[in-house]
């Protein structure tokens, strides 16, 4: 009987022992969990404090971008606290990205949409005196202003507005050059107008035709230049300011234009661009011998086409830059599409739209597709060569986003009050260059994002 009782009690004893072990394990687990929670709360508090600091700074910078005139003095003052006054001595320098997103490494800045932006542009035709008359659409009487209130937004990340105070501090004791045709001049004027809201630049040079210019920002010892070279190559052009030619262009496909080649060593940053001039009638030379032409019927020459010449030009330009002893930062800006409808610039073409296109509503013209394909191919090949030689080469791919802005051109308002005397007057339209302010200002948002977050500000 006793054996039977002991036999009955043994499982109960085992059960109690197991229960005690479970309770002991639970207590130990609870203590460990409490200890872990304490560490977590401590780290969370530090993270929360850091996040709060970051958050409270970012809206201030955004507000400055939206209302620059009200905040410019504060912006310039605050920038001294976190921007390098001199070129960083260490290659490990990490730029402060308070006004720039930090996760754009996986974001294609050039795929996106134009979105409404009620804050409007940084400047106006009143606050900037650097706007050429042909791009001063408001002064010339353009009646609508909706084209001013759009911003480019990449699909996978945010694109902050350009911060002129920070840009000037980053570029202290440095120089930029925009090298190309009149679109490059249009672009540099946009940048100049934005920077002038912080510091007024002094024009220190211009050529006889005022096509190449240089400006100096004395407080930052920063130099900004535009070098007029529409082909980037040596070219003999017989054309007046209205685009009327007296003879075919003589284009030397194996010779760079000395106007930019002889001074490129003074530039720390360069934006190179070509494009529309290669569509003009031209005779092509190599080794000082005629090789063929583009669009020259009746000359008894081989039609080589503009694509042949454009590829030759880019290969020569990019080879020169990426193999240079000058360790410059080079951006290549892709071709700019025009928006002529119902004709070309010389045959009554116009651009009367007042809203951006949405993606899929417009197709790129064949000539622009050919040019952009050549640009993508040649730049891709050159990037690796440049990297081996310490040259930073980046693609500023503005073609697609520009294609979506048919509303941003001067159109008939390239001249002053074109319909003042006759509402039905037939006037020449400009559907290639950009009103200022206008869509071209977003190119500089992209440019600054690439400089800051790609670590090019060295």
Image (tube, grey):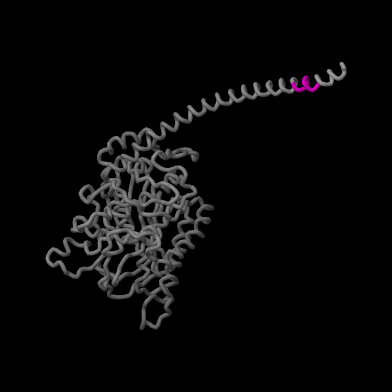
Query: Farthest residue toward the left?
Result: 421
Magenta highlight on residue 14: yes
Residue 34 belongs to magenta span:
no
Asked whether residue 4 appears in the rendered view, the answer is yes
Residue 261 visible somewhere in the drawing: no
Left or right of residue 383: residue 408: left
Q: Residue furthest top?
A: 2
Q: Residue at x 33, y 45 (%)?
A: 222
Residue 2 x/y as whole percent: 87, 16
Quadrant of the rendered image containing residue 420: bottom left
Tell me: residue 383, above or below residue 254. Answer: above
Residue 266 x %, y %: 38, 50
Residue 379: % across, % down = 47, 59
442 shown above or below 274: above
Quadrant housing the N terminus: top right
Q: How many marks?
A: 0
User: Toward the viewer: 17 or 384?
Assistant: 17
Q: Which residues are magenta?
A: 10-15
Residue at image coords 36%, 41%: 166
Determine the residue positioned at 30% across, 46% down: 195
Give the x, y percent position of residue 353. 28, 62
Please tell me in which quadrant of the rendered image residue 180 appears.
Answer: bottom left
Query: Does the magenta stretch mainly form a helix, a strand or a loop?
Result: helix
Q: On the rendered image, what quadrant is the C terminus found in?
A: top left
């Amino acid at each position: 009987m006793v054996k039977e009782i002991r036999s009955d009690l043994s499982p109960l004893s085992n059960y109690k022992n197991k229960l005690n072990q479970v309770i002991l394990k639970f207590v130990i687990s609870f203590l460990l969990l409490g200890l872990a929670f304490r560490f977590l709360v401590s780290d969370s508090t530090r993270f929360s404090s850091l996040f709060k600091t970051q958050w409270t700074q970012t809206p201030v910078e955004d507000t400055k971008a939206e209302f620059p005139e009200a905040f410019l003095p504060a912006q310039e003052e605050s920038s001294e606290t976190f921007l390098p006054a001199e070129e960083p001595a260490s290659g490990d320098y990490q730029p402060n990205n308070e006004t720039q997103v930090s996760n754009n490494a996986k974001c294609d800045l050039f795929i996106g949409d134009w979105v409404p932006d009620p804050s409007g542009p940084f400047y106006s035709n009143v606050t900037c005196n650097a706007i050429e008359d042909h791009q001063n659409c408001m002064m010339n009487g353009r009646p609508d202003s909706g084209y001013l209130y759009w911003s480019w937004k990449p699909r996978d990340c945010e694109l902050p507005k350009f911060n002129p105070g920070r840009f000037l501090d980053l570029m202290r004791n440095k120089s930029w050059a925009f090298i190309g045709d009149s679109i490059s001049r249009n672009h540099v004027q946009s940048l100049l107008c934005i920077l002038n809201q912080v510091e007024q630049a002094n024009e220190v040079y211009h050529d006889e035709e005022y096509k190449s210019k240089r400006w100096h920002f004395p407080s930052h010892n920063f130099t900004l230049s535009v070098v007029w070279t529409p082909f980037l190559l040596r070219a003999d052009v017989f054309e007046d300011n209205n685009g009327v030619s007296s003879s075919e262009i003589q284009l030397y496909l194996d010779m760079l234009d000395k106007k930019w080649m002889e001074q490129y060593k003074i530039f720390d940053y360069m934006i190179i661009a070509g494009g529309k001039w290669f569509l003009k009638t031209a005779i092509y030379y190599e080794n000082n011998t005629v090789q063929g032409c583009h669009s020259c019927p009746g000359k008894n020459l081989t039609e080589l086409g503009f694509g042949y010449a454009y590829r030759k030009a880019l290969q020569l330009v990019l080879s020169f830059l990426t193999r240079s002893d000058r360790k410059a930062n080079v951006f290549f800006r892709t071709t700019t599409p025009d928006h002529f409808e119902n004709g070309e610039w010389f045959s009554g073409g116009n651009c009367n739209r007042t809203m951006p296109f949405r993606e899929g509503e417009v197709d790129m013209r064949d000539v622009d597709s050919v040019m952009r394909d050549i640009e993508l191919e040649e730049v891709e090949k050159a990037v690796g060569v440049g990297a081996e030689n310490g040259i930073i080469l980046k693609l500023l791919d503005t073609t697609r986003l520009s294609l979506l802005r048919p509303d941003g051109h001067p159109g008939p308002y390239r001249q002053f009050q074109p319909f003042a005397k006759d509402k039905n007057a037939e006037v020449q339209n400009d559907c290639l260059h950009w009103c200022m302010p206008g869509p071209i200002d977003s190119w500089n948002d992209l440019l600054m994002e690439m400089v800051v977050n790609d670590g090019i500000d060295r």
